[in-house]
Amino acid sequence: QLEEDAKKKATTYQTRSTDLALITKTVEILEKQKNEKKGFYEGLYQNLLSKIQKEGFEDEKSLKISILDSTTEKSYQDEKEFLENVYQEKTTILDSKKLELTAIQTTELPEMKEIKEQIAFWENNLSQKHKELGQIEEQIHQNELFVVKYQEKQNEIEEKKEHFSYLEKLNKVVGSADGKVFVKFAQEFTLENLVRLANKHLQQFNKRYLIKTTQKDLGLDILDKDQAEIRRPTESLSGGERFLVSLALALGLSDLASKNIRIKTLFIDEGFGSLDQHTLETALEALDNLQNTGKSIGIISHVELIKERIKLQIRVEKRGGGRSHLLLPQ
């Protein structure tokens, strides 16, 4: 309601200001016309008077007497009075407008002060709003900068999270103070490699079995392909099967160690006596193949088949008194 009243009063003020400007303009026009008429008539009079005096007359009155009859003089006199009346009327109007203008200029409308105060209030309020708008725009700009910085920090955090995730995984492997976690990890890793290498040899002995690591305690199981690939404990193997698995592990261990140290000679002590004829043949063929790779295989055994198969032998003969005698090859 206050804003509406202010608008109405502002409109009234504008109307009065327009009227004042119009009256001022009218006064200026009338004043100009008055001065122009006055100058025009005075110029005519002086010109006429000069011409009358050149003709030998003293003034216009003596000229009238000599050239005008009473009727013509009366006509001119009436026209003069008419013009004087018009001039007087215009002068009166001009004076009235001047008085009106003065009254308007010196008299302030009762509500004009209030209108001016309200205009000043709204102008001040508008200025304040502009300041607040500037502050808001600056805050928006600062927020945009903050968002950019926040995104940069967020990206940095994500990078650190990724790095931390790697460190966390590494910590799970080696993160114990006494080193037991890392030792266990290294053992599991080494055992996995050993089993992989041992299975290559085991497949030459018996394709039925595969060595598998257990989920705890670095243990070993046997996967039996002939029994739906079930896992069996090593204790369930027969003596001959256990020997083949042990031999495969020994050969795998030699392969594993040979990555850093070249192992040229391998000795196998007993165990062959527990093998049946077919398994023994398979084991000996595998050892022959291994020997063909450049390794020297030494077998310590009393099995007759091995004695027959291996030509180069160092024999041990018993003698009395707890003594024995070595017989070297000829």
Image (tube, rainbow, N blue to C red):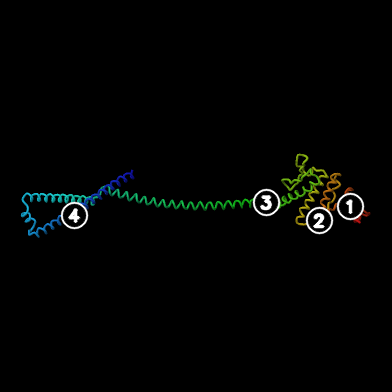
Of badges 3 and 4, nearer the viewer stands: 4
Q: Indicate the position of residue 77 as horizontal and vertical percent values.
A: 9, 51
Q: Spatial distance from mark 3 to mark 1, Cα to Cα?
A: 51 Å
- Residue type at mark 1 is Lys
- Residue holding disc 2: 264
Instruction: First in sequence, mark 1 or 2: give its number.
Output: 2
Badge 3 amino acid: Val
Q: Residue at x 77, y 48 (%)?
A: 200
Q: Is 216 positioned to the left or the right of 284 in the image?
A: left
Image coordinates of residue 132 in percent, x first then y, are 41, 51
Secondary structure beneath dot 4 equals helix
Q: Amino acid at mark 4?
A: Glu
* Mark 3 vs 4: CB contact within 8 A: no
Residue at 56% over, 52% down: 155
Quarter residue 38 falls in: bottom left
Q: Return the mark for residue 311.
A: 1
Q: Secondary structure at mark 1?
A: loop
Percent position of residue 259, x then y:
75, 55
The residues tagged by marks 4 and 2 sit, at their Cα atoms, a distance apart of 140 Å
- The CA distance from mark 2 to mark 3 is 35 Å
Quickly name the residue at label 3: 173
Compare marks 4 and 2 and give the one earlier in the sequence. Answer: 4
Relative to residue 275, is residue 177 drawn left or right?
left
Left or right of residue 123, residue 69 in this image: left
